[in-house]
Amino acid sequence: MLDNLSRVKKGARTYRRSSWDRSGANHDFLDLVPGERVTLLEAEGPAKITHMYWTTINASRFHFRQLVLRAWWDGEATPSVEVPLGDLFCIPHCTPVPVRSLCAVINPGGSDMLSWGSNLYLPMPFSSSARIELAYEVAPGMPADGFAFWYHIELEETSQPLAADVGRFHAQWRREPLTQHGGEGDPNVCLWDGVNLDGKGNYVALEAEGQGQMVGLHLQVDNVGGGWYGEGDDFCFVDGQPGEQWPPTYHGTGSEEIFGGGAGPNHAYDGPYTGFHMVASPDYAGKNAMYRWYLADPIRFQRSLVWTIEHGHANNYENDYTSVAYWYQVEPHAPFPALPGVQARLPRFPALVFEADAARVQCRKKLDSLQAAGADEGTVARARARWGQGSKALVEGRLADAVAAFESVT
């Protein structure tokens, strides 16, 4: 990979598309409003995207799943990428944490701001055209406000046509809000016996048809049952279907092995290829997330690929599973499952999380109205200070303090 840095590539041109201010001023971001769809990129090929970056400041924590990125290559009718933006960049459960991997990198911003720099380095080639669209989707009755959105997209254009065997980048989001107990043992109790000889009840992260290779997985588990949920093995069926192919082409031995950890990881880690980048509690309860990049060992398929994982051994855990699968394939791709609406995409949170965000929205509106009404500088300064205190409390997870600060702005 690094050897390519020394090669001088003839006929290549690199460039960027971004949210820079065309007037030359410093309004170098998009003003996103609820319900809006914006085109981030329209480009001609042959070319490939080499890097994508975006950030916001003090936006709702729910925007990570309200924003949906869709990408179409070479004029195709249906998108090859359809994923809530945060999940695509390895942000789990609408809750950013640092990630330092080869494909996705998440870096924090200011300690008093809700701002994270999100980077994706997976190449996205196209032959004739690329179109990337961002949609800001809002659920009825759910508070939402506009916010600033900065982005960069780096590309490399070539004078040579793409080879016929160059696959197109695909990414797909799936969720099962509560997996079903498989019937053996007590629900949400670590099961050592029990039998799973077909994988039919497993959580399914990807069902692909055609020819290509899977290169990554971002898996999120909200462990509502408690206890060690990770005895689930991965069952990967290559060029065969569950119930027909046995044993699966890849049969694992537990979640920790898939994501490169020691037995029962209960502290977060992140690395070039693997990570358990979110671990809410040492006793495994609550929100967890992990990633695996199949870069040196892509899962190649000639006809089909079905990637699944048990939710507890023999599927005896009832938990909330969400995933993004990343793969390349020669088109056409199989139809994607319908992407659920915003409400069905939101993580499980206590009521105070939603209360804090609603208070943030109302505070923002009050602050804007004070400025629009020409309030005196002292009043505006005090309101801004309370807004800052509320934002800092949100960053630090002090939700009650955030609500109190936001609601104090009158």
Image (cartoon, helix red, strand yellow):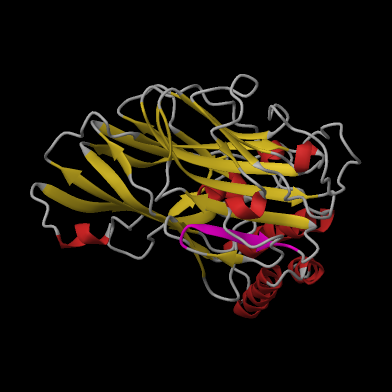
In the image, the segment drawn in magenta is 272-280
Residue placed farthest to the left in the image? 10
Horizontal relation, residue 189 to residue 159: left or right: right
**Image x and y of residue 139, in percent:** 68, 38
Q: Identify which residue is drawn at 89% across, 39% down.
A: 185
On screen, residue 138 above or below 351: above
**Placement of the C terminus among the 4 image quadrants:** bottom right
Task: Name, please, the residue furthest toward the right.
Answer: 186
- The percent position of residue 2, horizontal first and vertical second, equals 26, 61
- Is 362 magenta? The answer is no
Q: Position of residue 113 (x, y in %)?
A: 58, 70
Residue farthest to the bottom, as pictured? 378
Q: Establish if 87 lies above or below 302.
A: below
**Most foreground residue, 214 or 131:** 214
Q: Residue at point 71% right, 29% down? A: 197
Do we see residue 93 in this rendering? no
Task: Answer left or right for 12 relative to 237.
Answer: left
Q: Residue at x 69, y 75 (%)?
A: 389
The percent position of residue 125, horizontal first and vertical second, equals 29, 39
Quarter-of-image position of residue 234: top right
**Residue 276 colored magenta?**
yes
